[in-house]
C-alpha cells in the first residue's frame, strides 16, 4: 500500500506550502472545507516568510560561489610564489648562504627541506604570512634579501589572495547563517504540513482509495509505494 511522507528537502517543503496555499484558496466549497481556516491562514503567512529565507540563502550561496572562483585564481599565483620562495630559501641554506637556524623565523624546521603543505587555501593563508613575516625579521637582523623571487613580489600576490580569502570567509559565514535561518523554520513548516495533511486526508476519508489519494495529492500530499512495490504512485 502507498504510504505518505513529509517533504525532506527545503525545496520540497516550499512546493508543499505553495500547493496548499494555491489549492486552499479555490472558491469551491469542497476545497475550502478540506483545510481549516486557521491552518490555511498559517500556511499563507508561513509561505512568504519561508520564500524570503530561501531566497536570502540562495543569493548568499551564489555570491559565495562567484567569489570562490575569483579566490581560486588569486590562490594559484600566491601558492606558486610562496612555494618558490621557500624552495629558494632552502637552497640558500644548503649553499651555506643563510644559517639553517634562521629557518625557524619562518616557522620552518632547520633540517627539513620540504615545502610545507599549502594545497588548501587555509594553509596557504597561514604559511604565506609566516614566510613574509620571517623574511622581514631576518632582514631586520641584517640578513641579505632573497631576490628570486623578492619578498615584495610574494607580498603582492599574497595580499591579493588574502583579500579574496578574507572576503570569502565573510560570505561563507553569511551563507551558513542564512541556511541556519531556513533550517530553524523547517520544524515549524513540517509541523504545519503534518496538521494540514492530516486534515485533508480526514476530509476525503469517505472517498474510494484512488479517488481519495487524487484529491489529497491536489493539496500536495505525497504518496510513495513500499520498497517491494515497483511504481511510485504519487510524487510531487
Image (cartoon, grey):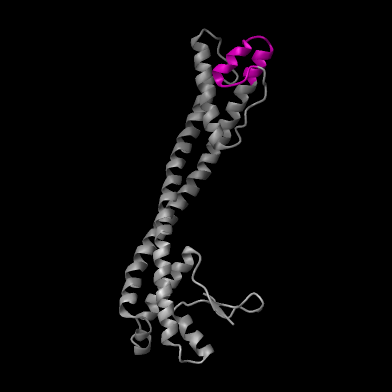
Where 24 falls versus 6 (above or below)? below
**Position of residue 192 measured from the top left corner of the image (x, y, whole percent):** 39, 71
State whether the magenta stretch is mostly helix, strand or loop.
Answer: helix
In this picture, is 140 found above or below 222? above
Q: Position of residue 6 (x, y in %)?
A: 49, 71
Quadrant position of residue 98: top right
Q: Residue at x 43, y 45 (%)?
A: 173
Magenta includes 108?
yes
In this rendering, the answer to whether 181 lies above or below 114 is: below
Nearer-the-camera pick, 2 or 18: 2
Q: Which range is magenta?
A: 88-110
Q: Is residue 222 above or below residue 110?
A: below
Q: Position of residue 128 (x, y in %)?
A: 53, 27
Indicate the quadrant containing the N terminus: top left, top right, bottom left or bottom right.
Answer: bottom right
Q: Which residue is at the front of the view, 3 or 62?
A: 3
Q: Is 21 on the left-hand or right-hand side of 71?
A: left
203 inside magenta stretch: no
Which is nearer the eye, 2 or 41?
2
Residue 96 point in image, percent of width and height:
67, 9
Tell me which residue sits at (52%, 73%) in the image. Answer: 5
Outermost residue, top direction? 142
Task: Place residue 194 in its image quadrant.
Answer: bottom left
Tag count in the figure?
0
Residue 228 shown left or right of residue 74 in the figure: right
Amino acid at each position: 500500500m502507498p504510504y505518505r511522507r513529509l517533504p525532506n528537502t527545503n525545496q520540497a517543503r516550499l512546493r508543499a506550502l505553495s500547493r496548499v496555499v494555491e489549492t486552499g484558496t479555490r472558491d469551491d466549497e469542497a476545497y475550502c472545507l478540506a483545510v481549516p481556516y486557521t491552518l490555511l491562514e498559517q500556511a499563507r503567512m508561513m509561505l512568504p516568510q519561508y520564500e524570503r529565507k530561501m531566497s536570502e540563502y540562495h543569493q548568499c550561496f551564489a555570491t559565495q560561489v562567484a567569489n570562490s572562483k575569483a579566490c581560486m585564481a588569486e590562490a594559484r599565483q600566491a601558492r606558486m610564489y610562496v612555494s618558490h620562495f621557500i624552495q629558494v630559501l632552502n637552497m640558500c641554506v644548503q649553499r651555506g648562504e643563510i644559517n639553517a637556524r634562521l629557518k625557524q623565523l619562518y616557522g620552518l624546521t632547520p633540517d627539513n627541506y620540504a615545502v610545507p603543505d599549502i594545497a588548501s587555501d587555509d594553509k596557504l593563508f597561514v604559511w604565506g604570512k609566516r614566510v613574509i613575516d620571517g623574511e622581514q625579521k631576518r632582514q631586520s637582523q641584517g640578513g641579505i634579501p632573497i631576490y628570486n623571487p623578492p619578498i615584495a613580489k610574494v607580498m603582492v600576490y599574497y595580499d591579493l589572495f588574502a583579500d579574496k580569502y578574507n572576503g570569502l570567509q565573510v560570505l561563507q559565514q553569511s551563507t551558513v547563517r542564512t541556511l541556519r535561518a531556513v533550517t530553524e523554520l523547517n520544524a515549524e513548516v513540517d509541523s504545519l504540513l503534518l496538521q494540514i495533511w492530516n486534515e485533508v486526508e480526514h476530509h476525503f476519508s469517505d472517498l474510494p482509495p484512488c479517488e481519495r489519494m487524487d484529491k489529497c495529492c491536489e493539496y500536495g500530499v505525497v504518496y510513495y509505494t513500499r520498497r517491494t512495490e515497483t511504481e511510485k504512485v504519487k510524487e510531487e
